[in-house]
Image: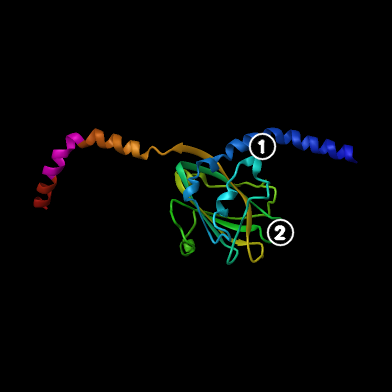
């Protein structure tokens, strides 16, 4: 019996050796979160919401988690340090009714509050219980191709008064924020010759109109 169990476990482990290493790299977006500015609304203890964005190999650890406070809802405001193309999300909780049952994703709306969650999300998912963090929900990549800020609204769980989350994994691609550099380049390329023209042409246009 134990021999069979060992053999089965070994098979799974062997298979898992390739997959988690690869998936672990893909789920590295937690390192691109501006953790200091990350907010979690309705968390029962200040700062716990930040703890669930952790390395892939810690996804099943139970010492770091966030519980909701007044009701079952949680709202994460997640600023990135650059631009993200979000491809998938994993949300893992307890194997009971406190597990999130539905999430709504919003992009590029900093400092969202619960009053803002009435608007149409970019995408919504009904979740299954996933205590082992195995289920990925693929996003519509076209909608999440230029994300500087992601909000995750957990709108309901499976019936408990409060929600518990152990792990949120974000899969995708990251690029440094080049926006300022591009702006500077454009300014340097066009500002010098245009300085006097802009000043002289605009008033004349105004007079004509």
* Furthest residue in direction right, as rendered: 1
Q: Quadrant of residue 104?
A: bottom right
Q: Where is residue 62 in the image (x, y as percent from the top left)?
A: 68, 50
Circle 1 residue: 20
Question: What number is the disc on residue 96?
Answer: 2
Q: In the image, what residue occupies the spot 34% across and 36% down?
A: 181
- Apparent side of residue 149 relative to residue 68 in the rendered image (left or right): left
Circle 2 — which element?
A: loop
- For the stretch drawn in magenta, what is the main secondary structure? helix
Question: What number is the disc on residue 121?
Answer: none
Q: In the image, what residue occupies the spot 60% across and 64% down?
A: 72
* Region in magenta: 192-201
Question: Which residue occupies the foreground of this view, 98 or 189?
Answer: 98
The N terminus sits in image quarter:
top right
- How much space separates mark 1 and mark 2, taking CA atoms? 25 Å
- Apparent side of residue 67 relative to residue 11 in the rendered image (left or right): left
Circle 1 — which element?
A: helix
Residue 204 belongs to the span the image colors magenta: no
Say which label, 1 or 2, has the lower sequence index: 1
Q: Where is residue 202 in the image (x, y as percent from the top left)?
A: 14, 46
């Amino acid at each position: 019996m134990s021999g069979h169990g060992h053999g089965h476990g070994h098979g799974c482990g062997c298979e898992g050796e390739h997959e988690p290493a690869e998936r672990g790299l893909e789920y590295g977006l937690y390192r691109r979160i501006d953790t200091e500015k990350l907010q979690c609304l309705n968390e029962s203890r200040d700062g716990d919401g930040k703890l669930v964005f952790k390395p892939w190999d810690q996804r099943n650890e139970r010492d770091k988690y966030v519980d909701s406070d007044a009701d079952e809802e949680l709202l994460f405001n997640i600023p990135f340090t650059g631009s993200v193309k979000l491809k998938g999300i994993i949300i893992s909780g307890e194997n009971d009714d406190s597990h999130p049952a539905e999430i709504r994703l919003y992009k590029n709306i900093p400092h969202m509050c619960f009053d803002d969650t009435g608007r149409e999300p970019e995408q919504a998912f009904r979740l299954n219980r996933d205590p082992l963090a195995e289920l990925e929900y693929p996003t519509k990549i076209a909608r999440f191709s230029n994300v500087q800020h992601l909000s995750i609204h957990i709108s309901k769980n499976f019936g408990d008064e409060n929600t518990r989350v152990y792990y949120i994994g974000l899969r995708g691609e990251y690029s440094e924020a080049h926006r300022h550099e591009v702006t500077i380049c454009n300014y340097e390329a066009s500002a010098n010759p245009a300085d006097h023209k802009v000043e002289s042409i605009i008033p004349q246009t105004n007079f004509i109109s």
